[in-house]
Image (tube, rainbow, N blue to C red):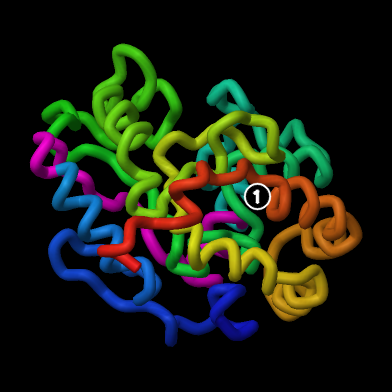
Amino acid sequence: MNELELTGRARTHIVELEQPHCLLHYGAATSFLAMRDAAARAGIDLVAASGFRDFDRQLAIWNGKWRGERALLDRAGQPLDVAMLDEPARIDAILCWSALPGGSRHHWGTDVDVYDAASLPAGCRLQLVPAEYGPGGPFERLTAWLDEHMAGYGFYRPYSTGECGAGVEPWHLSYWPLASEALESLTLPVLRRAIAESEILGRDEVLERLPEIYTRFILAVDPPAPRAARPSARLA
């Protein structure tokens, strides 16, 4: 991927899937569809809540949370009052659940937020919170199925333990064969240029803290299982 693709400012690496609708890197699409077909045979309707997300979309999410127009949550999923937070605290709170524009793995088209549409209760809105994917949650079965099968298709969870900067996201899957290359290519200077040229709120503070943010929230992700790094031959 080139610099614009890595930071979500170009989509020349992206293909649009019709069924289910999703935007993914052209190198990850086949594996995702194969995994979806396998899940369907187990009675799971694996669909994407979000795939590729461009820089402007990530910027809108960031700025909306900064202004308090979007919900801002702590690590326990409880609402925060934006007005009570100074700039450093506001940045930390946003980064817990939303990536920095230019630094989102969704820019690469290798990462996708998934859920089981067949298990979403009627009249309920998808929230993408850990409780939905844990014991007693509507996607408990999906979690167990992914635990057993996703690595065979090259996918893993980069935010699974809470030991990295971001919160635990059991819905967030990453296609390791391509994401690993993108992570190596997204250097600190590349990210700095994307931020410096943007209209991100809190930009001066973000740029001052960028080395820390880069280390804690971009580099510090959980490693894949061995099989995720080597997807089955039929999908290579």
Q: Is residue 54 left or right of residue 91?
A: left
Q: Is residue 141 left or right of residue 204?
A: left
The residue furthest top is 136
Tag 1: residue type?
Trp
**Residue 157 x/y as whole percent:** 49, 42
Of residues 120 and 59, the one nearer the viewer is 120
Quadrant showing the N terminus? bottom right
Task: State whether residue 5 is above or below residue 225.
Answer: below
Task: State whether residue 217 is above or below residue 207.
Answer: above
**Residue 212 x/y as whole percent:** 85, 51
The stretch in magenta equals: 40-62
Query: Which residue does the image show at 69% across and 38% down from the upper left?
Result: 164
Q: Is residue 179 left or right of residue 19?
A: right
Query: Which residue does the image show at 54% across and 80% down from the upper left?
Result: 5
Of residues 55 and 165, the one nearer the viewer is 165
Query: Which residue does the image show at 32% across and 45% down from the upper left?
Result: 114
Q: Is residue 122 left or right of residue 175?
A: left
Query: Which residue does the image show at 33% across and 56% down from the upper left?
Result: 232
Q: Please count the marks in the image.
A: 1
The quarter holding residue 231 reads: bottom left
Q: Residues within 10 Å of mark 1 (few under 14, many from 20)?
A: many
User: Is-magenta flag for residue 124?
Assistant: no
The quarter holding residue 4 reads: bottom right
The quarter holding residue 166 reads: top right
Quadrant showing the C terminus? bottom left
Q: Secondary structure at mark 1?
A: helix
The residue furthest front is 233
Of residues 80 and 33, the one nearer the viewer is 33
**Residue 17 x/y as whole percent:** 22, 70
Task: State whether residue 182 is above or below residue 224.
Answer: below
Residue at the disc numbered 1:
66
**Residue 98 x/y as whole percent:** 58, 48
